[in-house]
Image: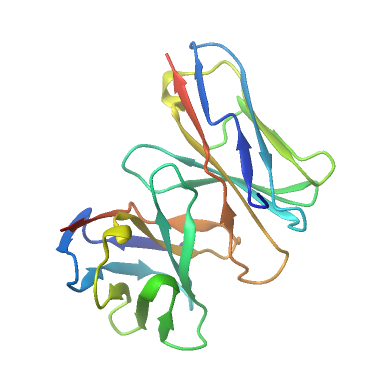
Amino acid sequence: AQSVTQLDSHVSVSEGTPVLLRCNYSSSYSPSLFWYVQHPNKGLQLLLKYTSAATLVKGINGFEAEFKKSETSFHLTKPSAHMSDAAEYFCVVRGSARQLTFGSGTQLTVLP
Amino acid sequence: DTGVSQDPRHKITKRGQNVTFRCDPISEHNRLYWYRQTLGQGPEFLTYFQNEAQLEKSRLLSDRFSAERPKGSFSTLEIQRTEQGDSAMYLCASSLNRSNEKLFFGSGTQLSVL
């Protein structure tokens, strides 16, 4: 079975400082991993996906994530936070049955 | 708007009543998914359609829940004899029939069972 663990339920950063949202995964085979973002009253939006083509994945809005098999991690980063980045972020693994398994989410707060 | 649309946005019902939600996927997408999200948690998979065929159902989908996609386009999710534990956000998503294709999510239907 596949699962993901998001290590922080809340992260606060100041505008213009780096963002790090941590995710560890568990999978019995090479996983497909995703990061989704959920803004209030909006649908979940895909930020980026890893499907074994390259370990460093670039997504939308300046986000990127690095797949590290040795650490079973897929952390999400952004060099400089913007106020509009405040949202809930989900790390997701795709299981063999094509369904997505979501982590419990990390609420990102960006302080002015 | 050509995204995934869900109706209604909010539903308040009394315990024991039946409710039905509708999802209209992106028109060319033949895969459709239902998820449920409770407060403070990530979405949990409920069921999946490819065209009109319901191919997978989670153990979360009790006998009181039924989903249909009769013509391979829109889908409905019905909950019979609602319980307070059914209160959640019900999310619909759609995708193309390709490996690792990304899912597009609707804004969800927020169900409150009183």
Instruction: Let me know if residue B85 appears in the view.
Output: yes
Question: Within the image, what quadrant is residue B19 found in?
Answer: top right
Q: Which residue is drawn at 76% across and 40% down?
A: B69
Residue A13, x across and y down, in percent: 16, 63
Q: Which residue is drawn at 57% across and 31% down?
A: B62
Question: Within the image, what quadrant is residue B40 found in?
Answer: top left
Q: Is residue A104 left or right of residue A15?
A: right
Instruction: Let me know if residue B59 appears in the view.
Output: no
Q: In this view, does A22 lie to the left or right of B30?
A: left
Residue B60, x across and y down, in percent: 52, 38
Q: Is residue A54 above or below residue A77?
A: below
Looking at this view, name the residue that lies furthest to the front. A112
Q: Which residue is drawn at 60% across and 71% down?
A: B100
Please state, as top left, top right, bottom left or bottom right, where the C terminus of chain A lies in the image. bottom left
Question: Within the image, what quadrant is residue A85 found in?
Answer: bottom left
Q: Is residue A30 above or below residue A9?
A: below
Front one among B114 and B55 = B114
